[in-house]
Image: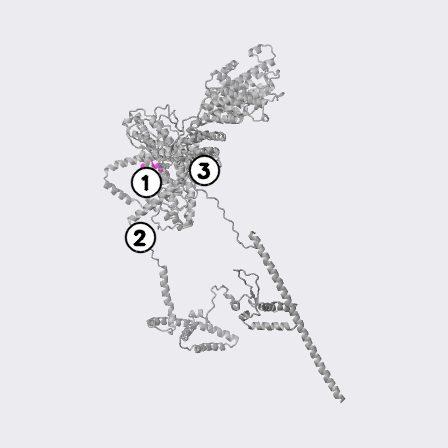
Amino acid sequence: MGKAPKKRSLADKVRKTKTSSEIKNNPFEVKINRKKFDILGRKTKHDVGLPGVSRSKAINKRKETLLKEYKQKNKSNKFIDRRFGEYDTKMAPDDKILQRFAMERQRVHDKKDVYNLNEEEELTHYGQSLAEIEKFNDISWYIIFLSHLAELTASHFGGGGGLLRRKTAGEQQQEDEGSQRAKSRQELIEELIQKSKQEKRERQVQREEAQELTEKLDQEWKSIQTLMVKKTPKAEHGDKKEEKPKLDEYDMMVRELGFEMKAQPSEKMKTPEELAREEREKLQKLEADRLRRMMGDEVGGSAQSQTHLSADDLNDGFILDRDDKKTLSYHVRDKEESGVEEEDGDEDNAEEEEGGSTEEDEDGHSDLDSEQESEDEDRIQENKETNAKPQKSKEEMKAQQEAAKAELPYTFTVPETFNDLKDLLHGHTPDNQRLIVARTQKCNHPSLGVGNKLKLQVQYIIETVWLSVGVHWRTAHTVSTEKLYALCQMFPEAACNVMQNVLRDAGHSVEEVLEVKGHAAFPTLDMLIYLKVTALLFPTSDFRHPVTTPALLYISQALTKCPVRSLQDVMAALVLCCLAVEYVSISKRFLPELINFLAGTLHLAVQDKTSLGYSVVPPFRPTGRNSNLLVLSDSESCKSWSKKSLPLSATQHLELKNDTDRDNHRLMCLFTCLDLVKRCCLLYKDLPSFPHIFQPIRMLLSKHLLAQTLPEPLQELHGEILEVIRSAPVTHRLLVFDKKKPIPLKLLTPKIVEVLDYGKKRGSTREERERERLKHKHKKEFKGALREIRKDTRFLAREKLNEVMNRDAERKRKVKELFGSLATQEGEWKALKRKKRK
Amino acid sequence: MMAPAKKRNVSSVKSTQINVKTAKIDLSCKVESILKSRKHANDVFDILEFLQSEKEKDVVSAVSVCSKLFCTLLERKELFMGKLLGEEEALSGKCSAEEKYRIFMRHRYNSCVEMLLEHLSHEGYSVKESALCCLMKFAAAEGQHPLEDLDWSEHYSFPRELIQAVVERLLSKSTDNSLLISRFQEFLEMEDVRYYVMSSIRENVGKVMDKSKGAVVPIYQNNLFTLMSSISMPSQESELSNFMVKQEAKHEDWKAAKLNEHKRVFERMWLGFLKYKLPSSMYKKVLVILHESILPHMSKPTLMIDFLTAAYEVGGAISLLALNGLFVLIHQHNLDYPDFYKKLYNLLDPSIFHVKYRARFFYLANLFLSSSHLPVYLVAAFAKRLARLALTAPPSALLVVLPFIYNLIRRHPSCRVLIHKPNTDGEPVEDLYVMDEEDPAQCRALESSLWEIKTLQKHYYPDVAKAAMLINTPLSEQEDDISEMLEITTYELMERDLKQTQNKSIPLEFETATQLLKGGGDVLGQHFCLN
């Protein structure tokens, strides 16, 4: 029984001594697992096994773990090694040692250095802190240090040195000092005080001396520096010392270079052709934008090009993303200056706009009064001018203008109210007025200071109002139009808001009148001007625009709901029609109200209103009061008529003294009307329903308003219109839906099953498969564990048996020993007895 | 009867000069004294004198005093009941003093009523109003304490004569009484008053119109209409609860307490009114309220057929309005109207987009054309005609018309050829539709296409253009709801656009503006100058 373990241990010993290759090649160690079938392409891991090796491995492992546990069983004390990583088998021993070392260092590390961020240890030289040495408090130490350093380098790079000797000398000194300290306490303290005072003094002296010395050294060094260039590092400590100023110089240079403005590539001067080309490209881009908006495509990015660029713009395309939404370049600038200011400004804007509109309202009421006044003023002014003009030659005028220019101050404060503006501009010639306005604008440019933007917005609002008066104030309109345009480019939102408010108010008032009476009066002159300004400031061709679309609707409202009752109404209506034509002239969009209205206006001129071949659309009536407004009272007046522009003020009050005047006016209206009809014909020529749209006008012109009754220019227009209508194509293709892209057939992707090996369950879901796999694994592990447990118990049993056997053997040996000793004792006793007997 | 009063009047011109306040105190004192003892009975004349004063204030105070006096007398039954004899006769007769007093007072009462009725056509509104109120108080009092003998059991106590007289005065031929009539409306809430007012109106109309031989009497008819339209009929029998006069017995049998009787009288009143020729504005007014406040309260609405068909034939706005009534009749009363759709078709002309009743018309037209049993040619004709007319319509109307046409095509899929006719070889064809043809069957709409909508794709208002774009692709199955758009106005469209401007940058004109009249094709500048 006792033999087997012995044998095994022997085998183990043998195996240990053998190398693995030897074992593998030993046919007695190797066990070949026989395979039932040879399967191509399958890699087998376990075709060869080394049962002996694995068994001994297992036994060893058990010895280390299980056996130890077994031995510790029922023992309350145990030895645990708490060193770092002691039980961590995964860690390499080197790592373990390193870690332990690091931890040791950390533990030792001084606690006061907790807040020391750069955890560098203090470097020392013979126990003296290097940092302190570098402060040059103690020149002697410094010198010692440097000489050591020199020697060290020398010894490293050839040549020996008296390092050791010197060192000992230094140490000796220290030791001497130490020996003196063995004295009584009192003495010691006194000595200490005295010493410290002395030291202090000495240190001071030393420092001075050192300073002198270093300076001297510096100077000397400089004088010999040139000679030292080729010298070996054996050179004196002066070398090291001199490095400092040198570095400084270099640093200075570097810094200087760093701080110096970097040279920027300047932009190439552009040739006129290039400039022209850029301009053209910009315009083309704007035009393309406009067209896109006209087609009604939704604007993708709001980073639409703003047309206005300041002179200071770097043109580097720098725009803050945050501001992209609603700013012009000026806004960007403001933001750059300070964000807070901008916010304030925005708030103020809102307030200002509110305030502005109320102000406007007030002004709107006062318009009526001031119009009259300003007219009077105009007349006086005009008279003066007309009187003055012929007397002056051109040169004189020029000279005078220049003089006036020179007289004008260069800065102006922004007028806060309408009256301020009036005062500001009063008494200047139109040119000067323009200059004043331009200067005001420039010196109050939004980029120049806080609040200027705000002021300018106020100005904008004021000017909008002013414009409505300015019509009468003839000299001013050119100035204000240009300026309005510029301001609008600067503040599109403010401009938009102002215009929208104007339109909203106007539309609302018309609506209110409509609800009560069912019809309304034509818009007043200022409203007409507003509409015109809208067209000037905002693109009329956009598919949808926050200002121009409502403006068009307002025109439509006026043209459908305002009955024509007098010649003044006809005038206002014609202005509206002109505006309507302007609004749609680029986009060529269809405005039915316009055609209706023009047909109605022409109907006013038809003499015989029986048996009409067409129908007039409200607000016109086939017959009745005011339906003969444009019928000539005297057919002879055709001959005396000549074309001239109609004054805009005629929409407000019209003074016609006699019948000929009235007839002339009527003919003028007719002329305008016919011209507008012609323009409309040309605009709408391509519409499929063109003949039907113009059918009433064609009937009217060809049957009722005959060319013979009209003066020459009108006859021409008459003929042209009929010609255009006649030449329009009558035939069209029948409507079909737009061709759609055929919808592709629904493609069914084939179902792909992942694994195609037989024998295994297929078609189950992923979860099921996973479950299956886990089950299998569990079973395997379970079996393995069982086997292990069995092996463990077997091992333990064996160990126990061993123990028992050992114990038994021991006992036997002891018993034998005892028996032996007893036997010898017995023998000796017997021998003694025999001797006695003898 | 007026003679003594007038005499007194002349003799006491001075007394009317005294100031009003004292006069009023004076009058109320007098009333008290009259009521206190019969000695002062002659003071009644003074009061009646005041009633004829020129000053409005005097009259008003006199009226209030009168109402107090005679109401009390009526309550006390101190007025003579039954058939009244002439004054002289009665005084000379051999009645008792008591009887004589009552006859005397009754005569004064009668003259007072007479004067009040006169005052109903006074210029001052306050006088008219107080007179009216006073008369109605009398009527109430009389109803409570009838002046007639009630021996005749079938007779219900109600001051019919008085009401009749009031109505007669209200329906003046020369002055517009609309204010007074609106005041009178308050009394019309009472069931019995309404009933008798209606019957007296009917009698009155017959009388007046026969006299004028059927010619139009605008002011009278206007008053009449105001009065008639202010009658609000109860819809249920149980609502009949508010009576001016309570009938002691046989209240249930009283005609004024029956809804059917009310309806009958109401119907007769209106028919009597509509029988005669009306001014055209009146036609419109009647037609506007017809379907809502007249037809439901008639016992036999079909009696209105004649009137409605006549109105439908008139053409224009009147026809549009008649549609509503006709619709009720066709829908609820099985009216069979020949050529209804043909007439509807002919109603379509450019003005329908501009008249006030546009919303109503399209609402009804939508209902009429919602039937899926209509022939294709008819629907196509409607669609094509509407499309053609859309060429003259304002945007607010276009936003209704376009979905309307689409709905027609959706309901009648065979009309799809109007917007999609693929089997032709792409050759241009003329529009074969005949706009002037009155018969939808002959207008050849089906051979045409809706090019008009194609034209409207270039409309200036973006929403219209978008709506018109829909014909480029097959229409969706879902019908558009046009009810929301029916009432929309141009201003509301404007508002919508003005509100839409949040958080988008505003595109600006890039062509620099130099002069006010320049730019934009320079149309304005060519024809107009600034001075």
In the rendered structure, are the residues bearing label 2 and label 1 in contact, judged by CB atoms less than 8 Å apart?
Answer: no
Q: Considering depth in this image, is B191 or B140 the residue closer to the camera?
A: B191
Are labels 3 and 2 assigned to the same chain? no
Q: Mark 1 and mark 3: span between their CA atoms? A: 48 Å
Residue A472 visible at all: no
Q: Nearer the viewer, mark 2 or mark 1?
A: 2
**Residue pointed to by mark 3:** B474
In x, y percent, where is residue A154?
40, 75
> Which chain is disc 1 placed on?
B
- Precedes in sequence: disc 1 or disc 3: 3
Tell me the magenta residue range: A466-485
**Residue pointed to by mark 1:** B514
**Residue pointed to by mark 2:** A268
Q: Amino acid at mark 2?
A: Lys
Marking on residue A749: none
* Secondary structure category for the residue under label 2: loop
In the rendered structure, are the residues bearing label 3 and label 2 in contact, judged by CB atoms less than 8 Å apart?
Answer: no
Residue density around tag 3, few if under 14, some if 14–19, many if 20 or more, within 10 Å = some
Q: Is residue B41 magenta?
A: no
